[in-house]
Image (spheres, rainbow, N blue to C red):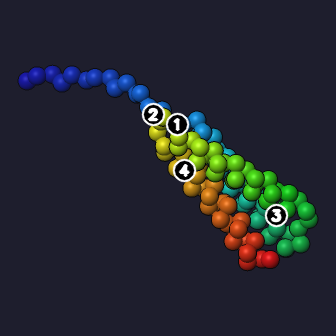
Amino acid sequence: MKKKKFYKKVRTKYDSKGGILSSLIAVLAICLFGASIFYSVVKGGAASSIVGKISAVSLILALIGFVLGMVSFKEKDKFERFSWIGSLANGAVLVMYVCMMLIYS
């Protein structure tokens, strides 16, 4: 019986840096979004301006993360997994903010 030869596979493609950064920004934006909703619920809807400030920072972060995710698709010979994750998550945060603005205004 022949012995199987095991070859070490060299990884030539890596995850895009913009995609990883976009995914991290998405996690931060989602956490801030949840924190603003939690704070507003705890205060019974009569929260101070801190909720608006947290929401504005979260909205700006989601917009920056979405743009970074879209730009990271142009990187050559890179995996696009984190680019997709970051773009979709930041896009979802943006859509949630737009829906909140349309419903509550």
Q: Which mark is residue 77?
A: 2
How many residues crowd mark 4 within 10 Å: few (<14), some (14–19), many (20+)?
some
Report if residue 87 is visible in the image. Answer: yes
**Residue 29, horizontal then vertical, whole percent:** 70, 53
The answer to whether 70 is drawn above or below residue 99 in the figure is: above
**Residue 52, horizontal then vertical, whole percent:** 85, 62
- Residue bearing mark 3: 39
The residues tagged by marks 3 and 4 sit, at their Cα atoms, a distance apart of 27 Å
Q: Quick one: 8 or 60, which is closer to the camera?
A: 60
Q: Farthest residue in the right direction?
A: 48
Q: Secondary structure at mark 4?
A: helix
Q: Residue at x 34, y 26 (%)?
A: 9
Mark 3 or mark 2: name the one nearer the start of the chain.
3
- Residue bearing mark 1: 75
**Residue type indicated by callout 2:** Asp
Q: Nearer the viewer, mark 1 or mark 3?
A: 1
Q: Nearer the viewer, mark 3 or mark 4?
A: 4
